[in-house]
Image: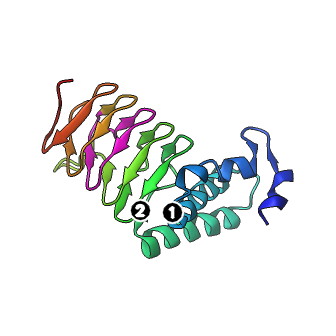
């Protein structure tokens, strides 16, 4: 079936096969991660296609949500912006807000949360912006209008509420950037 996708072309994004499998090699060690990311890319593709009947878009997006959230325990909404070669390590308990922007070649480990801060009055902060080549350890929380620069690393169990500069290493709760 994969070979039959070669002939399908989306004029804006190149081949559909390339779009759906852009994270395949990055997740070669985990079939679960591959399934999640192909499902994410397929649901994202379907959601933005105005030429597809709305029922088709709805079935694809709903199927993705049911499979990932209810069965696999991972919440990555189709609205999330994620660059290519996104890697999930031990993907369970991962929650990412749909307004988050994540760059290319990033790694996220199990039980991590990325999102905004909700105030008591119901207002919320903007979501994090994560650069390229960023790596998050297990059980990391990144919340609020923070930026993680290219090549930043966040240690396991850290709670990031402030910016991390490019190449910076952040650890702790609340996370602090280590001196080089």
Q: Tell me, yes or no, whether the two marked residues, 2 and 1, touch with CB atoms within 8 Å.
A: yes
Few, some or many C-alpha atoms within 10 Å of disc 1 (few <14, some 14-19, many ≥20)? Answer: some
Residue located 52% across and 72% down the image: 67
Vertical order, 180 against 155 (above or below): above
Query: Viewer-proximal residue, 48 or 134?
Result: 134
Vertical order, 78 against 130 (above or below): below
Vertical order, 92 against 130 (above or below): below
Few, some or many C-alpha atoms within 10 Å of disc 2 (few <14, some 14-19, many ≥20)? Answer: many
- Where does label 2 land, which residue? 91
The answer to whether residue 95 shows anywhere in this view is: yes
Residue located 31% across and 53% down the image: 113
Residue located 53% across and 62% down the image: 36
Start-end of magenta stretch: 125-146
Q: Which of the image's four quarters has the N terminus?
A: bottom right
Of mark 2 and mark 1, the one earlier in the sequence is 1
Query: Viewer-proximal residue, 167 or 95?
Result: 167
- Side of 75 where 119 appears, left or right: left
The answer to whether residue 50 shows anywhere in this view is: no
Q: Is residue 134 magenta?
A: yes
Q: Which of the image's four quarters has the C terminus?
A: top left
Which residue sits furthest bottom?
A: 71
Question: What colour scheme was applied to this rendering of the protein?
Answer: rainbow
- Where does label 1 land, which residue? 30
- Of circles 2 and 1, the one toward us is 1
């Amino acid at each position: 079936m994969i070979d039959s996708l070669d002939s399908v072309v989306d004029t804006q994004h190149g081949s559909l096969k390339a779009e759906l499998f852009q994270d395949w090699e990055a997740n070669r060690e985990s079939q679960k991660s591959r399934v999640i990311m192909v499902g994410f890319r397929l649901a994202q593709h379907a959601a933005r296609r105005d030429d597809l009947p709305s029922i088709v878009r709805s079935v694809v997006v709903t199927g993705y949500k049911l499979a990932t959230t209810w069965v696999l325990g991972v919440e990555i909404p189709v609205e999330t912006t994620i660059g290519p070669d996104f890697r999930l390590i031990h993907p369970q308990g991962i929650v990412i807000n749909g307004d988050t922007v994540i760059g290319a070649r990033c790694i996220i480990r199990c039980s991590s949360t990325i999102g905004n801060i909700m105030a008591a009055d119901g207002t919320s902060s903007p979501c994090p912006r994560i650069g390229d080549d960023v790596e998050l350890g297990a059980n990391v929380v990144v919340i609020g209008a923070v930026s993680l620069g290219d090549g930043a690393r966040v240690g396991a169990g850290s709670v990031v509420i402030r910016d991390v500069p490019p190449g910076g290493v952040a650890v702790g709760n609340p996370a602090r950037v280590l001196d080089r």
